[in-house]
Image: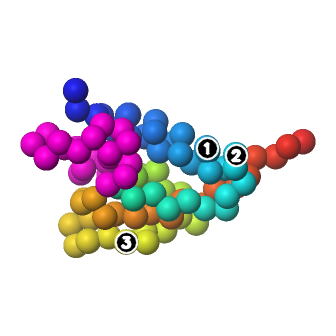
């Protein structure tokens, strides 16, 4: 079954939460890697445009596009998400 937008969003949230819990200040996420982790990359039935759209929609203030091609929907889209460490209080 092909991955859905929810699948990409859910996995990206897990990546961001993991980075936050490990104390990182940011994490770079590449669309090709995210797509591979969520559902592989079958050339005949890939969902790269959906993956890239989700990545862009999840950007917040302070996040930035590190790498993008002209169409913005391929496996090399890289976004730097800023994360804040969780408080231990």
Separation of marks 2 and 1 at Cα, in angstroms: 6 Å
Instruction: Please give left or right for residue 28 compared with residue 86 in the image.
Output: left
User: Which residue sits at x=67%, y=62%?
Assistant: 25
Indicate whether residue 45 is drawn in magenta.
Answer: yes
User: Which residue sits at x=52%, y=42%?
Assistant: 13
Viewer-nearest residue: 25 or 37: 37
Number of marks: 3
Kindly indicate whether the residue at mark 1 contacts the one at mark 2 (C-beta within 8 angstroms). yes
| Magenta region | 32-53
Separation of marks 1 and 3 at Cα, in angstroms: 22 Å
Label 3 CA crowd tier, 10 Å (few <14, some 14–19, many 20+): few
Indicate whether residue 7 is drawn in magenta.
Answer: no
- Can I make out residue 54 in this image? no
Mark 3 lies on residue: 67
Q: Which mark is residue 21?
A: 2
Viewer-nearest residue: 58 or 36: 36
Mark 1 lies on residue: 17
Q: Residue furthest right?
A: 89
Kindly indicate whether the residue at mark 2 contacts the one at mark 3 (C-beta within 8 angstroms). no
Q: Is residue 43 above or below residue 82?
A: above
Residue 47 % position (x, y): 22, 44
Give the SS element for disc 1: helix
Q: Quadrant of the C terminus?
A: top right
């Amino acid at each position: 079954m092909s991955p859905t937008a929810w699948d990409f969003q859910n996995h990206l949230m897990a990546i961001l939460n993991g980075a936050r819990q490990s104390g990182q200040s940011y994490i770079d996420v590449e669309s090709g890697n995210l797509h591979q982790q969520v559902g592989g990359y079958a050339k005949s039935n890939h969902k790269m445009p959906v993956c890239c759209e989700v990545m862009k929609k999840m950007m917040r203030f302070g996040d930035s596009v590190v790498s993008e091609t002209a169409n913005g929907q391929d496996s090399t889209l890289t976004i730097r998400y800023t994360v804040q460490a969780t408080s231990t209080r």
